[in-house]
Amino acid sequence: MATTLISRTLNPNPRTAEHIAEILQDPGFGRYFTDHMVTIRWTEDDGWHDAALVPYGPIAMDPATTFIHYGQAIFEGLKAYRQPDGSISTFRPDASAARFGRSAARLAMPAMPEDLFLAALEALVGQDVAYVPFGQEKSLYIRPFMFSTEVGLGVHPANEYLFVMIASPAGAYFSRGVKPVSVWLCTDYIRAAPGGTGEAKCAGNYAASLLAQSEAADQGCDQVVWLDALEHQWVEEMGGMNLFFVHGSGEDARLVTPALSGSLLPGITRDSLLTLAKDTALRPREARVSVEHWREGNASGEITEVFACGTAAVITPVGSVLSDDDSWTVGDGQPGPVTMRLRQELLDIQTGQAHDVHGWMYTLVPAPE
Ligand SMILES: Cc1ncc(COP(=O)(O)O)c(C=O)c1O
Protein backbone atom coordinates (compact mmCIF):
# COMPACT_ATOMS: atom_id res chain seq x y z
CA MET A 1 0.00 0.00 0.00
CA ALA A 2 1.16 3.51 -0.79
CA THR A 3 1.46 5.75 2.23
CA THR A 4 1.09 9.29 0.87
CA LEU A 5 -1.70 11.34 2.48
CA ILE A 6 -4.53 12.52 0.29
CA SER A 7 -7.22 14.80 1.76
CA ARG A 8 -10.87 13.85 1.10
CA THR A 9 -13.87 15.97 0.24
CA LEU A 10 -16.72 13.66 -0.63
CA ASN A 11 -19.24 14.33 -3.37
CA PRO A 12 -22.41 15.65 -1.69
CA ASN A 13 -24.50 14.22 -4.56
CA PRO A 14 -23.08 10.80 -5.47
CA ARG A 15 -25.09 8.60 -7.83
CA THR A 16 -27.47 6.16 -6.19
CA ALA A 17 -26.69 2.43 -6.17
CA GLU A 18 -29.58 1.94 -8.64
CA HIS A 19 -28.17 4.54 -11.04
CA ILE A 20 -24.70 2.99 -10.89
CA ALA A 21 -26.18 -0.47 -11.54
CA GLU A 22 -27.98 0.92 -14.59
CA ILE A 23 -24.72 2.44 -15.93
CA LEU A 24 -22.79 -0.77 -15.33
CA GLN A 25 -25.20 -2.77 -17.47
CA ASP A 26 -23.83 -1.07 -20.56
CA PRO A 27 -21.00 1.31 -19.64
CA GLY A 28 -19.44 1.53 -23.13
CA PHE A 29 -16.04 3.24 -23.01
CA GLY A 30 -15.31 6.70 -21.57
CA ARG A 31 -18.98 7.67 -21.38
CA TYR A 32 -19.56 7.82 -17.63
CA PHE A 33 -17.23 8.98 -14.90
CA THR A 34 -17.25 8.09 -11.22
CA ASP A 35 -18.27 10.47 -8.42
CA HIS A 36 -14.73 11.58 -7.53
CA MET A 37 -11.34 12.50 -8.94
CA VAL A 38 -7.90 13.05 -7.48
CA THR A 39 -6.06 16.32 -8.07
CA ILE A 40 -2.45 17.11 -7.12
CA ARG A 41 -0.64 20.35 -7.82
CA TRP A 42 3.03 20.95 -8.61
CA THR A 43 4.77 24.30 -8.45
CA GLU A 44 8.43 25.18 -8.77
CA ASP A 45 8.50 26.47 -5.18
CA ASP A 46 6.53 23.72 -3.41
CA GLY A 47 6.94 20.64 -5.60
CA TRP A 48 3.98 18.21 -5.38
CA HIS A 49 1.34 19.36 -2.89
CA ASP A 50 -2.40 19.63 -2.20
CA ALA A 51 -3.13 15.99 -3.01
CA ALA A 52 -6.92 15.74 -2.75
CA LEU A 53 -9.80 13.41 -3.51
CA VAL A 54 -12.62 15.74 -4.55
CA PRO A 55 -16.01 15.48 -6.28
CA TYR A 56 -15.68 14.85 -10.05
CA GLY A 57 -16.34 18.11 -11.85
CA PRO A 58 -15.17 20.86 -14.20
CA ILE A 59 -11.78 22.53 -13.82
CA ALA A 60 -11.86 26.31 -14.21
CA MET A 61 -9.07 27.63 -16.40
CA ASP A 62 -7.66 30.97 -17.48
CA PRO A 63 -7.83 31.30 -21.30
CA ALA A 64 -4.07 31.91 -21.31
CA THR A 65 -3.26 28.63 -19.51
CA THR A 66 -0.16 27.44 -21.32
CA PHE A 67 -1.16 23.84 -22.04
CA ILE A 68 -4.14 24.99 -24.15
CA HIS A 69 -1.70 26.82 -26.42
CA TYR A 70 1.49 24.79 -26.31
CA GLY A 71 0.25 21.32 -25.40
CA GLN A 72 2.29 20.33 -22.35
CA ALA A 73 -0.12 17.48 -21.55
CA ILE A 74 0.49 13.76 -20.92
CA PHE A 75 -1.66 10.85 -19.80
CA GLU A 76 -1.77 7.18 -18.89
CA GLY A 77 -4.46 4.51 -19.11
CA LEU A 78 -4.84 1.49 -16.85
CA LYS A 79 -7.63 -0.74 -15.61
CA ALA A 80 -8.90 -2.10 -12.31
CA TYR A 81 -10.52 -5.55 -12.24
CA ARG A 82 -12.62 -7.41 -9.69
CA GLN A 83 -10.78 -10.47 -8.39
CA PRO A 84 -12.34 -13.80 -7.37
CA ASP A 85 -11.72 -13.07 -3.64
CA GLY A 86 -13.64 -9.77 -3.82
CA SER A 87 -10.55 -7.53 -3.90
CA ILE A 88 -9.88 -5.00 -6.68
CA SER A 89 -6.52 -5.07 -8.45
CA THR A 90 -4.83 -3.25 -11.25
CA PHE A 91 -2.23 -4.41 -13.75
CA ARG A 92 1.38 -3.19 -13.59
CA PRO A 93 0.72 0.30 -12.17
CA ASP A 94 4.47 0.62 -11.51
CA ALA A 95 5.11 0.34 -15.27
CA SER A 96 2.44 2.93 -15.92
CA ALA A 97 3.94 5.28 -13.32
CA ALA A 98 7.37 4.80 -14.88
CA ARG A 99 6.09 5.56 -18.39
CA PHE A 100 4.26 8.61 -17.01
CA GLY A 101 7.63 9.76 -15.66
CA ARG A 102 9.32 9.24 -19.04
CA SER A 103 6.53 11.08 -20.85
CA ALA A 104 6.88 13.93 -18.35
CA ALA A 105 10.64 14.11 -18.88
CA ARG A 106 10.22 14.27 -22.68
CA LEU A 107 7.81 17.21 -22.37
CA ALA A 108 9.97 19.03 -19.80
CA MET A 109 7.43 18.38 -17.05
CA PRO A 110 8.12 17.37 -13.43
CA ALA A 111 8.38 13.69 -12.46
CA MET A 112 5.71 12.31 -10.15
CA PRO A 113 6.98 9.88 -7.48
CA GLU A 114 5.62 6.35 -8.01
CA ASP A 115 4.30 6.31 -4.44
CA LEU A 116 2.12 9.35 -5.11
CA PHE A 117 0.81 7.83 -8.35
CA LEU A 118 -0.11 4.62 -6.48
CA ALA A 119 -1.67 6.56 -3.58
CA ALA A 120 -3.89 8.43 -6.05
CA LEU A 121 -5.02 5.12 -7.59
CA GLU A 122 -5.83 3.63 -4.19
CA ALA A 123 -7.71 6.73 -3.05
CA LEU A 124 -9.86 6.99 -6.18
CA VAL A 125 -10.67 3.31 -6.67
CA GLY A 126 -11.12 2.79 -2.92
CA GLN A 127 -13.72 5.57 -2.82
CA ASP A 128 -15.54 4.73 -6.07
CA VAL A 129 -15.28 0.96 -5.78
CA ALA A 130 -19.00 0.58 -6.59
CA TYR A 131 -18.16 1.57 -10.18
CA VAL A 132 -15.89 -1.42 -10.81
CA PRO A 133 -18.10 -3.65 -12.97
CA PHE A 134 -18.61 -7.35 -12.41
CA GLY A 135 -18.19 -9.65 -15.39
CA GLN A 136 -15.58 -11.07 -17.73
CA GLU A 137 -13.61 -8.40 -19.62
CA LYS A 138 -15.32 -5.53 -17.78
CA SER A 139 -13.17 -3.11 -15.82
CA LEU A 140 -12.82 0.35 -14.36
CA TYR A 141 -10.64 2.35 -16.76
CA ILE A 142 -8.43 4.84 -14.94
CA ARG A 143 -7.07 7.90 -16.66
CA PRO A 144 -4.24 9.79 -14.91
CA PHE A 145 -3.15 12.95 -16.71
CA MET A 146 -1.07 16.06 -16.15
CA PHE A 147 -0.99 19.43 -17.87
CA SER A 148 0.69 22.79 -17.43
CA THR A 149 -1.34 25.41 -15.57
CA GLU A 150 0.97 28.43 -15.75
CA VAL A 151 -0.85 31.43 -17.19
CA GLY A 152 0.91 33.40 -19.92
CA LEU A 153 1.87 33.13 -23.54
CA GLY A 154 5.64 32.72 -23.24
CA VAL A 155 6.91 29.47 -24.75
CA HIS A 156 8.96 27.72 -22.05
CA PRO A 157 8.54 24.79 -19.64
CA ALA A 158 5.74 25.90 -17.31
CA ASN A 159 6.37 26.50 -13.61
CA GLU A 160 3.04 24.96 -12.48
CA TYR A 161 1.20 21.73 -13.30
CA LEU A 162 -1.99 19.93 -12.32
CA PHE A 163 -2.18 16.14 -12.07
CA VAL A 164 -5.69 14.70 -12.26
CA MET A 165 -6.93 11.11 -12.06
CA ILE A 166 -10.43 10.20 -13.20
CA ALA A 167 -12.10 6.81 -13.69
CA SER A 168 -14.73 5.43 -16.01
CA PRO A 169 -16.41 2.01 -16.02
CA ALA A 170 -15.67 0.11 -19.24
CA GLY A 171 -17.65 -2.68 -20.89
CA ALA A 172 -16.14 -5.60 -22.77
CA TYR A 173 -14.23 -4.22 -25.78
CA PHE A 174 -15.64 -7.00 -27.97
CA SER A 175 -19.15 -7.50 -26.63
CA ARG A 176 -20.12 -9.88 -29.46
CA GLY A 177 -16.98 -12.00 -29.71
CA VAL A 178 -13.49 -11.02 -30.84
CA LYS A 179 -13.67 -9.49 -34.30
CA PRO A 180 -10.60 -8.91 -36.52
CA VAL A 181 -9.97 -5.36 -37.73
CA SER A 182 -9.08 -4.15 -41.20
CA VAL A 183 -6.07 -1.81 -41.42
CA TRP A 184 -4.93 0.96 -43.76
CA LEU A 185 -1.16 1.32 -44.34
CA CYS A 186 -0.78 5.06 -44.13
CA THR A 187 1.88 6.78 -46.24
CA ASP A 188 0.44 10.32 -46.35
CA TYR A 189 0.96 11.04 -42.66
CA ILE A 190 3.32 9.85 -39.95
CA ARG A 191 2.71 9.42 -36.24
CA ALA A 192 6.23 10.07 -35.00
CA ALA A 193 9.73 10.76 -36.25
CA PRO A 194 13.17 9.98 -34.79
CA GLY A 195 13.87 12.48 -32.03
CA GLY A 196 10.17 13.36 -31.77
CA THR A 197 7.65 12.44 -29.10
CA GLY A 198 6.56 8.98 -30.32
CA GLU A 199 7.76 7.25 -27.15
CA ALA A 200 5.79 9.63 -24.95
CA LYS A 201 2.11 9.35 -24.16
CA CYS A 202 1.46 13.02 -24.85
CA ALA A 203 -1.79 14.57 -26.01
CA GLY A 204 -0.31 16.01 -29.21
CA ASN A 205 0.52 12.56 -30.60
CA TYR A 206 -3.17 11.71 -30.56
CA ALA A 207 -4.23 15.02 -32.12
CA ALA A 208 -1.73 14.37 -34.92
CA SER A 209 -3.16 10.89 -35.51
CA LEU A 210 -6.77 11.86 -36.12
CA LEU A 211 -6.51 12.82 -39.78
CA ALA A 212 -4.87 9.51 -40.69
CA GLN A 213 -7.53 7.64 -38.73
CA SER A 214 -10.18 9.52 -40.78
CA GLU A 215 -8.30 8.59 -43.95
CA ALA A 216 -8.37 4.91 -42.87
CA ALA A 217 -12.13 5.18 -42.30
CA ASP A 218 -12.55 6.81 -45.75
CA GLN A 219 -10.75 3.78 -47.19
CA GLY A 220 -13.25 1.51 -45.43
CA CYS A 221 -10.70 0.38 -42.81
CA ASP A 222 -11.10 0.18 -39.04
CA GLN A 223 -7.62 1.33 -38.07
CA VAL A 224 -4.51 3.02 -39.37
CA VAL A 225 -1.11 1.28 -39.35
CA TRP A 226 1.75 3.73 -38.90
CA LEU A 227 4.92 3.35 -40.94
CA ASP A 228 8.29 4.88 -40.15
CA ALA A 229 8.76 8.57 -40.92
CA LEU A 230 11.83 8.34 -43.15
CA GLU A 231 11.28 5.47 -45.58
CA HIS A 232 7.59 4.68 -45.11
CA GLN A 233 8.41 0.98 -45.23
CA TRP A 234 8.91 -0.14 -41.62
CA VAL A 235 5.81 -1.09 -39.67
CA GLU A 236 5.55 0.77 -36.34
CA GLU A 237 2.16 0.43 -34.66
CA MET A 238 -1.60 0.35 -35.23
CA GLY A 239 -3.64 3.33 -34.02
CA GLY A 240 -3.16 3.27 -30.26
CA MET A 241 -1.85 -0.29 -30.10
CA ASN A 242 1.40 -2.20 -30.69
CA LEU A 243 1.62 -4.96 -33.31
CA PHE A 244 2.75 -8.60 -33.20
CA PHE A 245 3.35 -10.99 -36.11
CA VAL A 246 3.05 -14.77 -35.72
CA HIS A 247 5.40 -16.76 -37.97
CA GLY A 248 4.65 -20.43 -38.54
CA SER A 249 2.05 -22.37 -36.62
CA GLY A 250 1.56 -25.07 -34.03
CA GLU A 251 4.76 -26.00 -32.19
CA ASP A 252 6.80 -23.94 -34.65
CA ALA A 253 4.91 -20.67 -34.06
CA ARG A 254 7.20 -17.73 -33.22
CA LEU A 255 6.39 -14.15 -32.31
CA VAL A 256 7.91 -10.99 -33.78
CA THR A 257 7.09 -7.41 -32.78
CA PRO A 258 8.51 -4.19 -34.25
CA ALA A 259 11.55 -3.17 -32.19
CA LEU A 260 11.25 0.00 -30.11
CA SER A 261 12.78 2.55 -32.42
CA GLY A 262 12.25 5.68 -30.38
CA SER A 263 9.10 6.51 -32.31
CA LEU A 264 6.88 3.68 -30.99
CA LEU A 265 5.02 3.84 -27.71
CA PRO A 266 6.53 1.16 -25.45
CA GLY A 267 3.25 -0.57 -24.59
CA ILE A 268 2.86 -2.29 -21.24
CA THR A 269 0.74 -4.98 -22.92
CA ARG A 270 3.49 -5.44 -25.53
CA ASP A 271 6.10 -5.86 -22.81
CA SER A 272 3.87 -8.30 -20.89
CA LEU A 273 3.22 -10.41 -23.99
CA LEU A 274 6.95 -10.58 -24.72
CA THR A 275 7.43 -11.93 -21.20
CA LEU A 276 4.53 -14.41 -21.46
CA ALA A 277 5.81 -15.59 -24.85
CA LYS A 278 9.27 -16.18 -23.37
CA ASP A 279 7.61 -18.44 -20.76
CA THR A 280 6.22 -20.58 -23.59
CA ALA A 281 7.87 -21.84 -26.75
CA LEU A 282 7.01 -18.79 -28.84
CA ARG A 283 10.60 -17.48 -28.89
CA PRO A 284 9.61 -13.81 -29.20
CA ARG A 285 11.83 -11.43 -31.11
CA GLU A 286 11.93 -7.65 -31.43
CA ALA A 287 12.97 -6.72 -34.94
CA ARG A 288 12.34 -4.32 -37.79
CA VAL A 289 9.36 -5.50 -39.85
CA SER A 290 8.93 -4.09 -43.36
CA VAL A 291 5.69 -3.84 -45.32
CA GLU A 292 7.38 -5.95 -48.01
CA HIS A 293 8.22 -8.65 -45.47
CA TRP A 294 4.59 -8.62 -44.26
CA ARG A 295 3.24 -8.82 -47.82
CA GLU A 296 5.61 -11.63 -48.86
CA GLY A 297 5.29 -13.52 -45.56
CA ASN A 298 1.55 -13.41 -45.93
CA ALA A 299 1.66 -14.62 -49.54
CA SER A 300 4.03 -17.50 -48.72
CA GLY A 301 2.07 -18.53 -45.63
CA GLU A 302 5.06 -17.80 -43.37
CA ILE A 303 3.14 -15.10 -41.47
CA THR A 304 0.06 -16.83 -40.12
CA GLU A 305 -1.45 -14.31 -37.70
CA VAL A 306 -1.10 -10.62 -36.88
CA PHE A 307 -2.55 -8.91 -33.84
CA ALA A 308 -2.47 -5.57 -32.07
CA CYS A 309 -2.29 -5.14 -28.31
CA GLY A 310 -2.99 -2.47 -25.72
CA THR A 311 -4.74 -1.82 -22.44
CA ALA A 312 -8.13 -1.03 -24.00
CA ALA A 313 -8.73 -4.20 -26.04
CA VAL A 314 -5.93 -6.44 -24.64
CA ILE A 315 -5.46 -8.13 -28.04
CA THR A 316 -7.22 -7.38 -31.33
CA PRO A 317 -6.63 -9.62 -34.36
CA VAL A 318 -5.77 -7.96 -37.68
CA GLY A 319 -7.86 -9.55 -40.45
CA SER A 320 -7.00 -7.63 -43.60
CA VAL A 321 -4.61 -5.01 -44.95
CA LEU A 322 -5.11 -2.28 -47.53
CA SER A 323 -2.44 0.01 -48.99
CA ASP A 324 -2.20 2.40 -51.93
CA ASP A 325 -1.32 -0.41 -54.30
CA ASP A 326 -2.24 -3.71 -52.67
CA SER A 327 -4.52 -5.53 -50.29
CA TRP A 328 -4.36 -8.89 -48.57
CA THR A 329 -6.14 -11.07 -46.03
CA VAL A 330 -4.10 -12.09 -42.99
CA GLY A 331 -4.19 -15.88 -42.67
CA ASP A 332 -7.80 -16.90 -43.17
CA GLY A 333 -9.00 -13.49 -41.92
CA GLN A 334 -10.19 -14.99 -38.63
CA PRO A 335 -8.66 -14.69 -35.13
CA GLY A 336 -5.79 -17.21 -35.00
CA PRO A 337 -4.99 -19.71 -32.24
CA VAL A 338 -1.84 -17.96 -30.94
CA THR A 339 -3.67 -14.62 -30.86
CA MET A 340 -6.58 -16.05 -28.90
CA ARG A 341 -4.42 -18.08 -26.55
CA LEU A 342 -2.24 -15.12 -25.56
CA ARG A 343 -5.35 -12.95 -25.18
CA GLN A 344 -6.88 -15.44 -22.76
CA GLU A 345 -3.61 -15.91 -20.84
CA LEU A 346 -3.31 -12.19 -20.19
CA LEU A 347 -6.99 -11.76 -19.34
CA ASP A 348 -6.78 -14.68 -16.91
CA ILE A 349 -3.91 -13.01 -15.06
CA GLN A 350 -5.70 -9.65 -14.97
CA THR A 351 -8.95 -11.11 -13.67
CA GLY A 352 -7.29 -13.43 -11.14
CA GLN A 353 -8.17 -16.65 -12.95
CA ALA A 354 -4.50 -17.59 -13.43
CA HIS A 355 -1.57 -17.45 -11.04
CA ASP A 356 0.28 -14.13 -11.27
CA VAL A 357 3.81 -15.55 -11.45
CA HIS A 358 5.35 -12.24 -12.53
CA GLY A 359 3.85 -10.20 -9.68
CA TRP A 360 2.05 -7.88 -12.10
CA MET A 361 -1.17 -7.43 -10.15
CA TYR A 362 -1.39 -4.70 -7.49
CA THR A 363 -4.20 -4.72 -4.93
CA LEU A 364 -6.00 -1.37 -4.75
CA VAL A 365 -8.88 -2.44 -2.51
CA PRO A 366 -8.39 -5.45 -0.21
CA ALA A 367 -10.89 -8.31 -0.12
CA PRO A 368 -13.74 -7.80 2.37
CA GLU A 369 -13.06 -9.40 5.79
C1 LIG B 1 0.13 4.87 -29.51
C2 LIG B 1 -0.06 3.71 -28.58
N1 LIG B 1 0.62 2.57 -28.82
C3 LIG B 1 0.48 1.51 -28.02
C4 LIG B 1 -0.36 1.54 -26.92
C5 LIG B 1 -0.46 0.33 -26.04
O1 LIG B 1 0.10 0.59 -24.79
P1 LIG B 1 -0.38 -0.18 -23.49
O2 LIG B 1 -0.21 -1.63 -23.77
O3 LIG B 1 0.53 0.31 -22.43
O4 LIG B 1 -1.81 0.19 -23.28
C6 LIG B 1 -1.08 2.70 -26.64
C7 LIG B 1 -1.99 2.76 -25.48
O5 LIG B 1 -1.58 3.19 -24.43
C8 LIG B 1 -0.94 3.81 -27.49
O6 LIG B 1 -1.62 4.94 -27.26
Image (cartoon, rainbow, N blue to C red):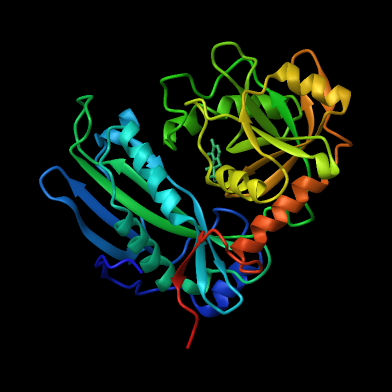
Q: Is residue 307 left or right of residue 320?
A: left
Residue at horizontal 61 percent and vertical 43 percent from the top: 274
Q: How many marks?
A: 0
Q: Is residue 359 left or right of residue 117?
A: right
Query: In which quadrant of the rendered image does the N terminus lie?
Result: bottom left
Q: Quadrant of ligand 1?
A: top right
> Where does the image place residue 136, in percent across and percent down from the top left?
68, 66
Q: Nearer the viewer, residue 125 or 368?
A: 368
Residue at horizontal 44 percent and vertical 49 percent from the top: 96
> Where does the image place residue 284, in percent across and percent down from the top left?
66, 38
Q: Is residue 86 left or right of residue 161?
A: right
Q: Residue furthest bottom?
A: 369
Depicted 17 relative to depicted 3: above or below: below
Residue at horizontal 81 percent and vertical 39 percent from the top: 252
> Where does the image place residue 319, in percent across and percent down from the top left?
80, 36
Q: Nearer the viewer, residue 242 or 273?
A: 273
Depicted 226 relative to depicted 16: above or below: above
Residue at horizontal 57 percent and vertical 29 percent from the top: 259
Depicted 354 relative to depicted 173: above or below: below
The quarter of the picture where residue 353 lies is bottom right
On the question of residue 76 being in view, the answer is: yes
Q: Nearer the viewer, residue 169 or 241?
A: 241
> Where does the image place residue 34, in percent across and percent down from the top left?
46, 65
Q: Is residue 359 left or right of residue 185?
A: left
On the question of residue 138 being in view, the answer is: no
The quarter of the picture where residue 329 lies is top right
